[in-house]
Image (cartoon, rainbow, N blue to C red):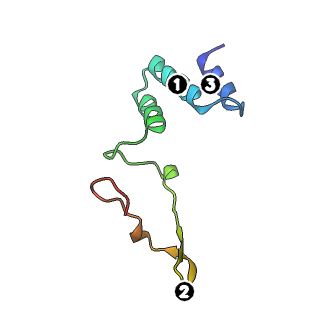
């Protein structure tokens, strides 16, 4: 069975993990000499570096909800996205 056929069959089996499939894809990319496929698989499995544009399908919108309370009141509310920014030193605000 060819490597491509193995990958296609593995994708259809829910019990198969994505990790081994990505490894097989990297091997296939190497055998084909496809730098574009090899780079894509690497980025998908290890994360996209800052200098590379992230594909549209990897970008999602989030909304944050907070539960605020003290001795006098309690409130569940959406939090402004400006509260959830990453600081330059790597900590979340």
The circle drawn on residue 23 is: 1
Residue at which label 2 appears: 72
Nearer to the camera, 80 or 53: 80
Q: Which residue is mark 3?
A: 7
Alpha carbons under labels 2 and 3: distance apart: 59 Å
Whole-percent x, y for residue 29 in the image? 47, 24
In this rendering, the label closer to the viewer, 2 or 3? 2
- Give the answer, above or below, for where 92 lies relative to 58: below
Residue 19 occupies which quadrant of the picture?
top right
Q: Earlier in the sequence, mark 1 or mark 3?
A: 3
Q: Quadrant of the C terminus?
A: bottom left
Residue 82 percent location from the top left of the image: 39, 70
Secondary structure beneath dot 1 equals helix
The residue sitting at the bottom extreme is 72
- Closer to the eye: label 1 or 2: 2
Which residue: 48% across, 38% down?
44
């Amino acid at each position: 069975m060819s490597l491509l056929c193995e990958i296609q069959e593995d994708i259809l089996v829910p019990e198969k993990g994505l990790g081994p499939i990505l490894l097989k894809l990297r091997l296939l990319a190497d055998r084909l000499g496809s730098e574009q496929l090899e780079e894509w698989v690497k980025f998908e499995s290890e994360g996209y570096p800052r200098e590379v544009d992230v594909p549209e399908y990897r970008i999602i919108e989030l909304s944050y909800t907070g539960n605020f309370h003290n001795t006098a009141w309690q409130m569940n509310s959406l939090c402004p996205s400006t509260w959830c920014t990453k600081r330059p030193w790597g900590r979340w605000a």
